[in-house]
Amino acid sequence: MKTILFTSICLILFSFTSMPRGAEINKESTSHSHYNEARKQTIVYICTGPGSYAYHSHARCSGLNNCSTQIYSIYLSDAINRRRSACQRCY
Ligand SMILES: [Zn+2]
């Protein structure tokens, strides 16, 4: 969602700047790769209680309702390292 917004802002900015400038285009592609880097660091939510096996895209998922312990927000890559699988309800 953020990426779509970001791209549309770029498109609007580009349509206003009539002069073609190579430097500007290079700058844009750099910021795009930065965005991809940020998306790898997606935050997910996990319950640490016994029997919890999934990670959730948001903390208010119904799958977390039965969580008896604290809900932690961790990186998606960490959740995968902990052998968590994507929640069936919010993914
Ligand atoms: Zn969920």
Image (tube, rainbow, N blue to C red):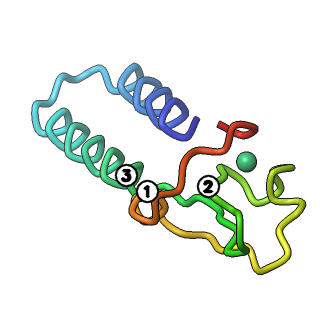
> Is 6 placed above or below 65 here?
above
Which mark, by number, is residue 55? Answer: 2
Residue visible at 55% across and 41% down in the picture: 2
Q: Can you tell me whether the CB of the residue at mark 1 lies under 8 Å from the nearest atom of ligand 1?
A: no
Give the image location of residue 52, x and y in percent.
Answer: 69, 62
Residue visible at 20% across and 38% down in the picture: 24
> Is 16 placed above or below 26 here?
above
> Is 22 placed above or below 72 here?
above
Task: Give the amino acid at mark 2.
Answer: Tyr
Task: Give the amino acid at mark 3.
Answer: Lys
The crowding category of the residue bearing disc 2, from other C-alpha atoms within 10 Å (few below 14, some 14 to 19, many at least 20), is many
Q: Can you tell me whether the CB of the residue at mark 2 lies under 8 Å from the nearest atom of ligand 1?
A: yes
Give the image location of residue 83, x and y in percent.
Answer: 46, 58
Viewport quadrant of the C terminus? top right
| Camera-nearest label, 2 or 3 | 2
Tell me how far mark 2 sits from mark 3, CA to CA. Answer: 15 Å
Give the image location of residue 20, x and y in percent.
Answer: 18, 23
Residue visible at 42% across and 31% down in the picture: 13
Is 90 on the left or on the right of 38, as rendered? Answer: right
Which mark, by number, is residue 80? Answer: 1
Task: Give the amino acid at mark 1.
Answer: Ile
Mark 3 secondary-structure assignment: helix
- Mark closer to the chain start, 2 or 1: 2
Q: Which residue is mark 3?
A: 40
Give the image location of residue 50, x and y in percent.
Answer: 71, 72
The crowding category of the residue bearing disc 3, from other C-alpha atoms within 10 Å (few below 14, some 14 to 19, many at least 20), is few
Mark 1 secondary-structure assignment: helix
Answer whether labels 2 and 1 touch (C-beta < 8 Å). Answer: no
